[in-house]
Image (tube, rainbow, N blue to C red):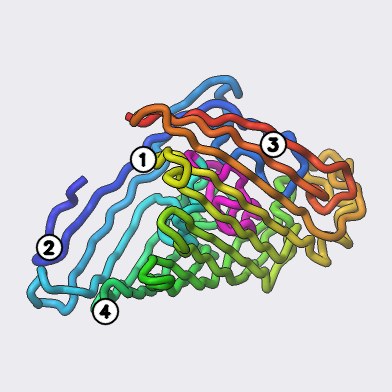
Amino acid sequence: LPGGEIGNAEGKLFAQFRMGQGDGLTRTLSAFGGANATGFRVQGARPDDDATVLLAQAWYQLDVPLPLGGFKPRSRETLSFNFGKMDPFLFFDQNSIADDETTRFLNTAFVHNPLLDAGGDVGVDTFGFTPGLRLAYKNETAKPIAWGASLAMFGAGSGATFTDSFEKPFLIAQFDTEQRFFGGLVGNYRLYVWRNGQATPYANEADTTTEVHSGWGLSADQRVGDAVTLFGRYGRQTKGKVRFDQAMTLGVEFGGSYWGRGADALGVAVGNLRTSADFRNDAPTLDADADGTPDFGYAAGGSEQIAEVYYRQRINKQFEISPDLQHVSRPAGNGAKDMNLVGLRAQITF
């Protein structure tokens, strides 16, 4: 919504309401990557089977054209400021074909950097949101080539609340650039570093201690044809006890225009999540729910490997369905049997 003006600066208000019911398979499968990133349930006093409406995000953004006092229509530089409760992945680690579980890949390993999302290092609350502040600069003087830099401080810790979550916040900085390769086709490249001052070792719900986690990551997407886009992500943990400390995901989306269905798409992705040395040593004795029984209780090793294929079919402008297949090898770095998952997503837009 419009958020008022201050001179040449333009304000915007954003709010998101979310409602849902059920966790899907995410909580019942022992794997690093969550099989269904769309699963959503309000926990606490309400019964598990009670669908609830949640004010997920509410934030304000002020865009200031540069130079200050210049002629706004000719400005090619912008300074943006955000504050409120938000989803950090709206502004960091973005990707044109691997960041929306409602239309593309379902496994959390392919929606965001697995170290931040599936690994829990981003420090958000149960529903994926957190209070924060963000400052960003974008330069389009050489348009269509552009570049930008951004820095943000978000709440961290248990629940990422407005009380003490900024004592040791989650900090992230990103440099991004939009380029034109392969005869002028658009590509986006992002490099970022993060530090979580209130991370939980191994994202263990029963552990009340916190420690500092840090790492860096890359996210890239590049069109290589009229309807073919490649994506890749890499993450590396540099500090902290985590279940996996390196993650790489690669994938491609083919537009349906190649087979006469321009609104359809076929996506394929593979991922490798390598177990950390600390987790390999501690997994046999880790207790995730404080009942005294080792919940992992196995000799972790190697890497969890994930593959996913989906086909998004447009039925009409308001309705899409997407059959989805996933294969997980060595789930959670265990020597257990491989898993094969079958899903069907329905998307209604209005």
Residue kind at label 3, given as amino acid type:
Arg
Report the Cα–Cα distance between label 4 and label 2.
27 Å
Under tag 3, what secondary structure? loop
How far separated are the C-alphas under marks 1 and 2?
25 Å
- Report if residue 17 is visible in the image: yes
Q: Is 126 positioned to the left or the right of 178 in the image? A: right
| Residue 160 can be seen in this image | no
Give the residue displayed 25% in from the left and 49% down from the top.
13
Seen from the viewer's position, the closer of residues 128 and 43 is: 128
Q: Residue 6 carries which label?
A: 2
**Mark 1 neighbour density, 10 Å: few (under 14) some (14–19) many (20 or more):** few
Mark 1 and mark 2 in contact? Answer it, CB < 8 Å: no
Q: Main secondary structure of the magenta part?
A: loop
Q: Mark 1 points at which residue?
A: 16
User: What amino acid is labelled 2 in the image?
Assistant: Ile
Which quadrant would residue 236 be assigned to in this image?
A: bottom right
Q: What stretch is highlighted in magenta?
A: 102-127
- Earlier sequence position, callout 1 versus callout 3: 1
